[in-house]
Structure formats: structure tokens, C-alpha cells
Image: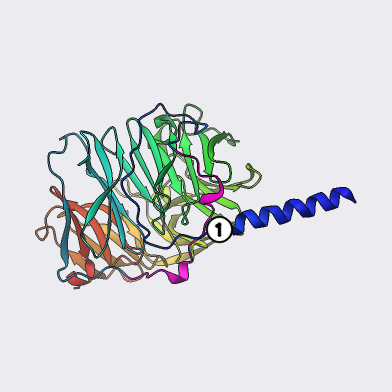
């Protein structure tokens, strides 16, 4: 009897704690935050601040404007890099609605570097947090609440609404693969000598390692292929993690489910095949991607491209997967696909970008290389109508509707 009473009291206290956390609004701003370059730690003890359950908020996808940003011209210069190291890559990314852009550049407040943020269509950029080295990779959660930046000094997970560093990750643990849940509350990376999974959740406020492999693990990053090796999705305290484990000799991909409340890993599944260009649905309940069965490896082109013949839809709650044939066999690898996997964004031989309808092969939008120049893909809106690119030293936003065929 007493045990039942204690359990009821515990449940009431837990619900009260969760109810005390206000949900920040989309586009909340915060001032510049300094990130101290202390040695990284898997436990997260070197975080600039602790957040605890404050990270447990969910933004309502139905209140997000999913249309891309409108500008007067098809090509809009968002930023120009100046005095940037010749050997450093220009990196940037955007949310799936195209409203928030982040990029790396030199800091105005120190001799170091920084992650900058810009909320479109306003073209005013501001520093978000500083880094000791130029960023190599940048990630932004679907709704733009959480940023992850990787540089030689390590990985930095930063909350924009809270305006603070959540945790710092050793470089070896995050340089190969990482992912942030759409609401920004769950972070997972994969790496290290043993290729372990490292998981961060605000309820635990630290990064912990788990090993789950039941088959030989890939020995190098080049043995992974297809969609981002890590994709995280929160649903009632559960996070799905999808990791590519196949090689070019044995194609496969892996499902893994994480119970973030109990902090354990309890489901594993592997399917033979080649999965590429994953994208989340508007409600983040489904992952849609292009798929090629393992037998398609026998039909590779002279350039080594694997024919993509199916569209895969993965239910991220039930972990079920359905395949349906595409209307056209694809031998070009797209840069991105739209949420329904009906259109793909491709890099053209002349350096331009095109949006192609999969069923017919029709080119819907085409941004030529001569205007605005050689384009390096950085990110895109979920409907592919807006694309973030680097052209020379310029960070540009392309409204693909301005290049309609």
C-alpha cells in the first residue's frame, strides 16, 4: 500500500516539474555568449552552464510557417566572408522552413571565430557564440532552437532560446556523425575508437556512451553511405536513431531505438539496401528517403552510381518501413529531397542546381552556374523552393521559383 502511495506522489511531482517549463517561441533571440575552450568531457562536466529539465520543451509544428522566404530577387546575398583562412571551409545551414540561417565566420568580439545567426527575411546577422577554431560542420534543429558546431577543439551544443552552451563533446566522438532532434531537446553522436553511440538529453544533462553493435562495425567514415548516419527524433521520451552501417560490398542500414527516460537501447533492426537523402515530414513522424535494394549493386553505372528505384517511408513511431517504386530510375545522387520524396535537388554538371520531379524526370527549377556562379550547396528549405549556397566568398539564398523553366 505504502509503495503505491509513494509511486503516485512521484508521478505527481514529475508532472509538476514538467509543467513548470515554459515553451519558448519560435525565433526567440538572445545575446552573444562566450564559449570557453576547456578540454572536452564525455560526462559534460565542462559545460558552461547546466540546464537540467529546462531543455524539455516542444514547439508546435502546426504554428510554423513552412513556406520559404520571399525576396525581391531570385539571388540574395546574405553574407560575405572576409579575411577567412584559405584552408577553412565555408559552412552554413538553415532550418527546414528556411527562416533561420547559421554560418561560421570570424568573431567581431575577439581574434577567434564564431557561429553567426540570421533570421530571414531580415538580413541582420549577429554572433551567437565564439569558437577557438573555424567551424567544420554546423547543424541546426528543425525548428531552429539548438545549434551544434564542430571544430578541431570539439563539438559545441548550444541552445538559442536559453542563450547558453549545453555541453561540449570531444572531437573524436562527434567528427564523423551527429544529429539533433527536431525540437532540439535530444542530441546524439557516433564515433570514437569503438564507434560508440553518445547521447545527450536535458533530463540527464550529460553525455553518456552506449555500445550496441551486434555485427562488425565500420572501420572508417568512408564505409558509411547515404543519408546522414545519425538522425534523431523524439516521441514521448523515445528517440529513434538511424545509422548507416553498410559498406560498398555489403549494403545495409540500421534502426536503433533509444529510451531516453530509462537511458537504454532496446531495439535493433537491419535491412539490406542503400538508403539516401532522408528528409522528415512536416510533423516529423516519418522519414522519407530514396532506396535501392542490394541487388541494384549489380547494375551500377560506369561511374559507380547505384540505381535508385524505390521511395522508402519509415514510420518513426512504429519503426515500420514501406517501399514503393519510383516512376523513374535515378542514377544521379540528389543533394536533398522534399518531404514527400516527389522532387529532388541535384547538382548540374555546369555547377548549377536543379529541382527534378522523380516520376517524370522533368526539371522544374534550374539555377544556372553563370548566374550566380559556381554554387556549393549548404542547405535548403524542406520544400526545395529555397536553397542556401556558397558562391565564391558569398553566402546566398536562392529562391528557386525565380528560375522556373
Q: Position of residue 194 (x, y in %)?
A: 51, 28
- Residue count near mark 1 (Cα–Cα under 10 Å), binned few <14, some 14–19, many ≥20: many
In the rendered structure, the answer to whether residue 273 lies left or right of residue 390 reads right
The location of residue 382, given as percent across then percent down, is 36, 63
Total of numbered circles in the picture?
Answer: 1
Would residue 117 be seen by someone viewing this image from the given angle?
Answer: yes
User: Between 298 and 153, which is closer to the camera in this rendering?
Assistant: 153
Q: Position of residue 339 (x, y in %)?
A: 41, 65
Nearest to the observer: residue 161 or residue 78: 161
**Residue at position x 46%, y 56% in the image:** 182
**Horizontal side, residue 21 vs residue 182: left or right:** right
On the image, the x and y values in percent for residue 61 come to 46, 67
Q: Which quadrant of the structure image shows residue 282?
A: bottom left
Q: Which one is nearer the viewer's eye here, 332 or 347?
A: 347
When the figure is inspected, residue 89 is found, relative to residue 28, above or below; the finding is above
- Which secondary structure dominates the residues rendered in magenta? loop
Based on the displayed image, in which of its 4 quarters is residue 359 positioned? bottom left
Residue 294 forms part of the magenta stretch: no
Q: Which residues are magenta?
A: 49-67
* Colouring mode (rainbow / by chain / secondary structure / one colour): rainbow
Residue 248 seen anywhere in this rendered image of the structure: no
- Seen from the viewer's position, the closer of residues 275 and 199 is 199
Residue to which mark 1 is pinned: 316
Determine the image quadrant of residue 98.
bottom left
Q: Is residue 61 magenta?
A: yes
Amino acid at each position: 500500500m505504502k509503495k503505491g502511495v509513494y509511486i503516485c506522489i512521484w508521478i505527481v511531482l514529475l508532472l509538476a516539474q514538467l509543467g513548470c517549463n515554459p515553451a519558448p517561441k519560435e525565433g526567440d533571440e538572445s545575446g552573444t555568449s562566450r564559449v570557453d575552450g576547456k578540454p572536452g568531457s564525455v560526462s559534460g562536466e565542462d559545460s558552461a552552464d547546466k540546464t537540467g529539465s529546462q531543455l524539455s520543451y516542444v514547439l508546435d509544428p502546426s504554428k510554423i510557417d513552412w513556406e520559404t522566404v520571399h525576396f525581391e530577387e531570385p539571388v540574395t546575398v546574405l553574407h560575405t566572408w572576409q579575411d577567412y583562412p584559405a584552408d577553412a571551409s565555408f559552412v552554413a545551414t538553415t532550418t527546414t522552413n528556411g527562416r533561420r540561417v547559421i554560418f561560421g565566420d570570424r568573431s567581431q568580439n575577439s581574434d577567434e571565430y564564431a557561429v553567426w545567426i540570421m533570421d530571414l527575411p531580415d538580413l541582420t546577422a549577429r554572433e551567437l557564440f565564439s569558437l577557438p577554431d573555424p567551424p567544420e560542420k554546423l547543424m541546426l534543429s528543425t525548428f531552429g532552437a539548438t545549434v551544434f558546431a564542430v571544430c578541431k577543439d570539439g563539438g559545441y551544443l548550444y541552445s538559442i532560446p536559453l542563450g547558453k552552451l549545453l555541453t561540449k563533446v570531444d572531437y573524436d566522438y562527434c567528427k564523423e556523425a551527429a544529429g539533433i532532434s527536431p525540437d532540439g531537446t535530444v542530441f546524439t553522436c557516433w564515433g570514437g575508437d569503438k564507434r560508440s553511440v553518445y547521447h545527450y538529453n536535458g533530463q540527464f544533462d550529460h553525455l553518456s556512451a552506449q555500445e550496441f553493435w551486434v555485427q562488425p562495425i565500420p572501420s572508417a567514415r568512408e564505409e558509411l553511405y547515404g543519408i546522414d548516419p545519425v538522425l534523431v527524433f523524439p516521441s514521448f521520451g523515445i528517440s529513434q536513431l538511424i545509422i548507416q552501417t553498410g559498406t560498398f560490398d555489403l549494403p545495409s542500414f540500421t534502426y536503433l531505438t533509444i529510451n531516453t527516460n530509462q537511458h537504454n537501447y532496446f531495439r535493433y533492426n537491419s535491412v539490406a539496401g542503400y538508403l539516401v537523402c532522408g528528409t522528415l515530414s512536416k510533423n516529423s513522424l516519418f522519414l522519407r528517403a530514396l532506396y535501392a535494394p542490394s541487388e541494384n549493386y549489380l547494375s551500377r553505372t560506369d561511374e559507380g552510381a547505384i540505381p535508385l528505384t524505390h521511395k522508402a517511408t519509415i514510420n518513426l513511431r512504429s519503426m515500420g518501413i514501406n517501399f514503393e517504386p519510383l516512376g523513374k530510375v535515378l542514377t544521379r545522387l540528389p543533394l536533398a529531397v522534399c518531404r514527400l520524396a516527389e522532387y529532388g535537388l541535384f547538382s548540374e554538371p555546369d555547377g548549377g542546381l536543379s529541382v527534378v520531379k522523380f516520376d517524370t524526370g522533368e526539371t522544374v527549377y534550374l539555377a544556372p552556374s553563370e548566374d550566380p556562379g559556381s554554387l556549393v550547396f549548404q542547405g535548403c528549405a524542406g520544400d526545395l523552393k529555397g536553397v542556401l549556397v556558397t558562391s565564391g566568398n558569398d553566402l546566398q539564398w536562392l529562391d528557386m521559383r525565380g528560375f522556373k523553366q
